[in-house]
Image (cartoon, rainbow, N blue to C red):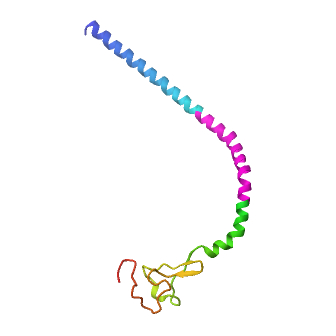
């Protein structure tokens, strides 16, 4: 090889070494920043989070107390007025057992059996009975 080729290869090797050193320095800096951010997050969690929790408890406690008192007052009303499901039985609404259209929810004390027969079907065989698979 000629001298200029050797010099060129030597320059390329030097550049590669310098780039490697640069990225090693960047990697060390990033690691240091991650360690620093972990330390800061830990300090925030230990010191500030407790203070924030106490502050929020002081603010929300009166509202929560009022809410629980209101819950005691309105609890009976909600139980009477929220819908609940009544399943069909052989004694009540036997034609509706297994029917796809059965709704069976009680609203304000009134049972809605299904949209086609809101009060249920009187006989054992409903003409609109349909299984869940769409068979008649």
Left/right of residue 104 with respect to residue 9 in the rendered view: right
| The N terminus, quarter of image | top left
User: Where's residue 115, x and y in %?
Assistant: 45, 80
Tell me the quarter of the picture where residue 33 sits.
top right
User: Residue reaching furthest bottom?
Assistant: 123
- At a point 69% along the width and 44% down the height, the residue shown is 52
- At a point 68% along the width and 73% down the height, the residue shown is 76
User: Where's residue 73, x and y in %?
Assistant: 72, 69
User: Where's residue 15, x and y in %?
Assistant: 38, 16
- At a point 66% along the width and 37% down the height, the residue shown is 43
Tell me the quarter of the picture where residue 46 sits.
top right
User: Where's residue 20, x and y in %?
Assistant: 42, 22
- At a point 68% along the width and 70% down the height, the residue shown is 75
User: Residue reaching furthest left?
Assistant: 1
What's drawn in magenta, residue-wise? 37-65
| The C terminus, quarter of image | bottom left
């Amino acid at each position: 090889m000629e001298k200029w080729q050797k010099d060129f290869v030597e320059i390329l090797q030097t550049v590669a070494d310098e780039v490697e050193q640069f990225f090693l320095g960047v990697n060390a800096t990033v690691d240091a920043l991650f360690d620093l951010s972990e330390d800061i997050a830990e300090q925030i969690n230990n010191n500030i989070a407790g203070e924030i929790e106490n502050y929020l408890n002081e603010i929300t406690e009166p509202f929560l107390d009022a809410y629980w008192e209101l819950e005691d007052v309105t609890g009976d009303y909600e139980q009477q007025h929220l819908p609940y499901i009544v399943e069909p039985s052989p004694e009540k609404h036997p034609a509706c057992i297994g029917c796809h259209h059965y709704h069976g929810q009680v609203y304000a004390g009134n049972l809605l059996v299904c949209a086609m027969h809101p009060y249920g079907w009187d006989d054992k065989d409903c003409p609109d009975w349909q299984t869940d698979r769409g068979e008649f």
